[in-house]
Image (cartoon, grey):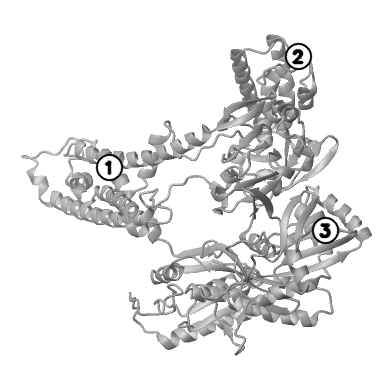
Amino acid sequence: MAPAPTIIEDFELEVLELVEERSRRVRKRSNGGGGGATSTKRDALQVDPKTAAHTGLRDMVMEGWATKVGVPKGAAPSKAALNNTTDNHLRPQRPSSIYTKLLGIFSVSTTQTSETDRRIMANNPEFNAQFNYAKNFIKTSKYTLINFIPYNLFEQFQRLANFYFLCLLVLQLIPVISSLSPITTAVPLIGVLTVTAAKDAYDDFQRHRSDRQVNRRKSNVLRNGQLVEEYWSKVVVGDVIRMENDQFVAADVLLLSTSEPNGLCYIETSELDGETNLKCKQCLPETEDLGQDTSLIGAFQGEIHCEPPNNQLNKFDGTLHWEGNIHSLDNDKILLRGCILRNTNWCYGVVIFAGKDTKLMMNSGKTKFKRTSIDRLLNFIILGIVFFLLSMCLFCTVACGIWEMLTGQYFRVYLPWDSLIPPDPAGGATVIALLVFFSYTIVLNTVVPISLYVSVEVIRLCQSFLINWDDNMYYVKSGTHAKARTTTLNEELGQIEYIFSDKTGTLTQNIMAFNKCSIAGRSYGDVIDPRTGDLLEINELSRPVDLSRNPYHESNFKFYDNKLMDALDAGDRNCESFFRLLALCHTVMPEEKKGKLEYQAQSPDEGALVSAARNFGFVFKSRTPNSITILAKDAQEVYELLCILDFNNVRKRMSVILKKDGKIRLYCKGADSIIYERLKDGQDVIKRLTQEHLDGFAGDGLRTLCLAYKDLEEDYFQNWKTRHHEAAISLDSREDKLAAIYEEIENDLILLGATAIEDKLQDGVPQTIANLALAGIKIWVLTGDKQETAINIGYSCQLLTDEMVNIFIIDTQSASEVEDQLQKFREEIRNVSATKRPKTNVSVVTFSEDEDDVGGTNATDSGEANGDFALVINGHSLVFALNAKYERLFLEVASHC
């Protein structure tokens, strides 16, 4: 039978007392006594005293308490025995058994602090409980009812004025010193502390309310083969949960099955990365058959081995051990906490990470006490006032001592000294002067403005309301007003010196449109006047290509060069291969909505390319885990999908390996610099022509990709596939092993052409960047585009201007070349600064908008602002520039740009 709760509590107390007693003995033995020979012998045997203490203590206590709770005597069972035994005495029905609790007490110190990997058994809470994984309860608030007063007072007394008046209040409580009632200081001090505490309590109450709202969200959890509603805070690692459309995901879960064909589901990750486009996830084909049968899912006993909790949103390594097979798990099979399920009726998943271990919470950080620049300035001002006050009191102290020595001693007949004062003139005058110092401190306390902080808090509150009511920060399209979530927002914004931004979706609209392309050395997309041969500018009056004969065409797709359609009609094999690659090499998912084919793409680039192929007659129709179906000029083609080589920021490319009619072909698309490195020899002409087109596309500010393919032999592919599977299920350096396998097969490619996609700027971006630059803010923009594209976008958004003296471009491939360029640029900056503003013995600071300051306020040798330079650096060069040897030189150049 299960032990009573009171017995459990008494048992735990005894265990803790014995642990403390044993620890004291171990420390005593290790700190004292022991000769050299004995010590050497003990070191030679080197047994961890904590391990020995825990092992012996566990057996002793469990055997002693076994009699009390009716459990048979004997050595403590192992963790495996606890999980596997069917003995009712050793495995009570409740998880709060003596043995489970004791193992939890003894193993908590190791499993929580040194977790190197994670083992989870689905639908087995007893197995998972031994590892003490975090519960799904979250807490982002800073205070509790218990610690609010001491913690908040500690923070408030970091303000010097508050600390000063606290010291003053203590002095006023000493009758010998103070002639004023302590109430005169206590009342305003308590008032200030109360007002500030009320504001802090309100802010933290909002956090508590948000936490409570999240923790009390409902989730359908599978318990004992039945779906039951549980609060999110009650979900634990290993639970299988059911999620439905438009619901938030409660924890980080491994996807088991979904309502969609082929085990697909769609999620929105705006809470994680700010992106609103839907992402596709797919469960293992082996678990897809579980469906929504609760009996099958309840009987699922797969064991998951995976990486420990971390904050990397785009990475997950693990394996699933089930029915004697090992299956590789990656990020495509994981749903993260904070995601929203979209366009999917239901799905099931097993919880991998919960609560503070989820990737969302590990990226959130702990709430910290922040001190704004205004607070620091006020502290500095108060410190100066206090020093002024102390100097006044010191002067009065010296004057009082001199007066008492020379004159005051003769008035003792009328004003006798206190009994504490020594009778001799010198000693008495000294003591009186010291006491008077504190008295003057009390009398002159009004010199320090205690209401200053209250005034600042009121001003902050009013400014936050002004932000909320500002019509100039109202977004008409969505009807959204600005919302100041903290009263210090205005001054926090005023402290910004640097802005680090990406380009896509921030400066641009993230709405991609297929604009131009290069196929077999021929460029398409420009409209040429047939009479003069000049390029025509595309405008509202330009006539797009007629695509209406294609039943799958999209009305919003526009392309203006008829030569491409003519080439397809003429059966140009290069053009057909080009669009066939676009229709096959991607991770887009199709779906039918109201009889209309729609695509769900993880990135707008992929969606734009697949849409372009669709409109030119190569329609991506459907996919399964093992096949892809397209319509190529109304003829259905089914390809066997052998492997997908995923895109990532290091590879900068993706590939698919397909089989049709016994032929295996690899299709690849990626950055031009990456593809060109892997091309087969003997393609000099097409490489040169395509590169010219790529440079032209980049000069127009378009995003470019290169397309290539390669035919594979059956024997070689099978050998490669075996090695790929071994790398995919490895938990040790999986990414490095897969990268090496991918690198091996993605070479000797044949170039097909290149694509160019347009991503328009957001409304008002140029004006916004110009205003930020006038405010003295330096802007760094990170983009994955070609260097020419990045520079063109820089001019479009006024990050770069023609008025700048020079734009420094660092694009070398070695550390020494980077150093040479940086030194050259530094000398040029110094020469220009010396020419424009010769050094003088007088430092002058001006506040003027007459200078060309678009690049941001830049410190120069003369101390003035200078926005005459800009810096463009590619990824290879940046790696060298951030090396410890060159980082100061890089910082010096970058701070002037």
Amino acid type, mark 1: Val
Dot 1 or dot 3, earlier in sequence: 1
Q: Provide the secondary structure element on which disc 3 rests.
A: strand
Classify residue 712 as left or right of residue 425. Answer: right
Question: Residue 710 in the image: x percent, y percent?
Answer: 83, 67
Question: Residue 674 in the image: x percent, y percent?
Answer: 73, 70
Quadrant containing the N terminus in the rendered view: top right
Q: Looking at the picture, tell me which residue is in the foreground, 884 or 143.
A: 143
Q: Provide the secondary structure element on which disc 1 rests.
A: helix
Does residue 664 lie above or below 184 as drawn?
A: below
Q: Looking at the picture, tell me which residue is in the foreground, 5 or 615.
A: 615
Dot 3 or dot 2, earlier in sequence: 2
Amino acid type, mark 3: Leu
Q: Provide the secondary structure element on which disc 2 rests.
A: loop
Q: CA distance from mark 3 to mark 2?
A: 56 Å
Name the residue tied to disc 2: 88
Q: Residue at x 47, y 82 (%)?
A: 804
Asked whether residue 585 is in view, the answer is no
Does residue 587 lie above or below 70 as drawn?
A: below
Q: CA distance from mark 1 to mark 2?
A: 63 Å
For the residues carrying marks 3 and 2, which lies nearer the camera in this image? 3
How would you rate the neighbour count of disc 3 (Cα within 10 Å): few for under 14, some for 14-19, many for 20 or more?
many
Name the residue tied to disc 1: 192
How would you rate the neighbour count of disc 1 (Cα within 10 Å): few for under 14, some for 14-19, many for 20 or more?
some
> Would you say the residues marked 3 and 2 are in contact, meaning their CB atoms lie under 8 Å apart?
no
For the residues carrying marks 1 and 2, which lies nearer the camera in this image? 2
Q: Residue furthest front?
A: 549
Does residue 434 lie above or below 715 as drawn?
A: above
Classify residue 122 as left or right of residue 839. Answer: right
Name the residue tied to disc 3: 658
Question: Residue 64 in the image: x percent, y percent?
Answer: 71, 14
